Amino acid sequence: MDRVYFLDHTPINFHFKQSPRDFVVEEIPLYEFSGEGEHLILHVRKKDLSTWDMISEIASFLGIKQRDIGYAGLKDKNAMTKQYISIMKIHEDKLVNFSHDKIKILDRFYHNNKIKIGHLKANRFFIRLKKVTPVAATKIAQAVEKIKLYGMANYFGYQRFGIDGDNYIKGREIVENRYKERNVKLKKMYINAYQSHLFNMWLSRRIEISRLISSFKSSELSDMLNIPLRDIDEMKKQAHPFKLIEGDIMMHYPYGRLFELEYEEDEIERFNARQISPTGILSGKRVKTSQAQARVIEKEYDIKMNEDGARRYAWVFVEDMEANYKEQEAWMELHFTLPKGSYATVLIQEIAKRELKESK
């Protein structure tokens, strides 16, 4: 898809490739482990393996089913990653003899319950960009400062759409009854990819509108965007590059309840203060829809389907971000923390302002 970026610089050339040396992820757990209970929590480091590959290896060694192993989130395959998984405490003794050249158990804890999907607070990243010239380094540093100030668009990354990036097409065909997939897991994956594609399309449109609002006079925009002049004037007052619209569904940040934006001045300030953030729709059943002018834009990307829908943060904030340039090696090293569900590759793509998958 032609993604719209919120940063306004020209594309930056550098080399980016996911590898254990240049792409490191560390999971930050949602809570401290109790130190007691029937579940054994393993802090595991893996490289060149997906989370499912790692779980399969450990389950096979212990003689248990993969579903008996709890995990909070899926981590990249082409990376060095650290995450927490859980097994029943009764299997602890068997782990004494566990050895794998791509998996290392770093630490162990006891806890009262199994780790489940979403039981993580955030992910901490280290990413090394290569073949960075001094001019490119300056542009990257400037982009980093803007991301630190404003946050970033919470697009789904290319990993969501399969090796060829077209899983969403099968998902669309399933929803439109033009293709049948008998494998239940594959069917869900394809439909989820279609939901993600629609979300990304909606988010691109909203960023495009936001950029136009910042660039043109109100009188020039009303007919161009088919948005009432009153709404355009209100959006122009907003300092943030992502413009909120009346009827947006907001969510307390970094987690909390959903509520409808009423365009009160204090709500705009709460977004600027990172206390709330707008959400976009993942089409499906039982999902709260936006209202007013926000719904006029959203409904184009809200497709009826039998899969459950949801709301997803449209905008997230990057924490503890640093950029260090090593001129002799022509490397730019980035450290930053993202909330769960957000993609580091999306941040890198925003900085580059171009597609990155071809350089993988």
Image (cartoon, helix red, strand yellow):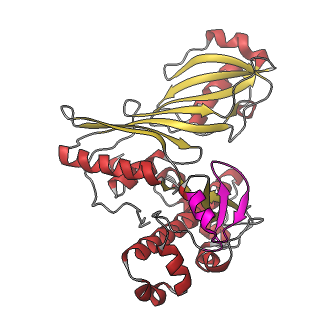
Magenta-drawn stretch contains 247: yes
Which contiguous range is marked in magenta? 246-271
Give 89 or 251, whichever is nearer the viewer.
251
Task: Report the front residue among 89 and 238.
Answer: 238
Instruction: Tell me if residue 113 comes above or below residue 166 in the rendering.
Output: above
Question: Which quadrant of the structure image shows residue 309?
Answer: bottom right
352 lies above or below 62 = below
> How many badges with numbers are in the image?
0
Q: Residue at x 60, y 73 (%)?
A: 301
Q: Quadrant of residue 99?
A: top right
Residue 62 vs residue 218: left or right?
A: right
Q: Position of residue 238 (x, y in %)?
A: 49, 68
Judging depth in this view, the residue of 205 and 60 nearest the camera is 205
* Residue 2 horizontal/vertical position (percent): 41, 67
- The reply, left or right, for residue 68 in relation to residue 355 is right
Q: Nearer the viewer, residue 322 or 346?
A: 322
Which quadrant of the rendered structure holds the C terminus?
top left
| Residue 314 visible in this rendered orientation of the protein | no
Direction from residue 345 to residue 156 in the image, left or right: right
- The magenta stretch spans residue 270: yes
Residue 155 horizontal/vertical position (percent): 51, 57
Residue 193 point in image, percent of width and height = 58, 59
Residue 260 visible in the displayed image: yes
Please report the residue visible at 36 percent of the width from the left and 52 percent of the height from the top.
351
Side of 97 relative to 125 (left or right): right
Specify the quadrant that holds the N terminus.
bottom left
Q: Residue at x 59, y 47 (%)?
A: 341
Residue 68 lies, with reference to residue 238, above or below; the image says above
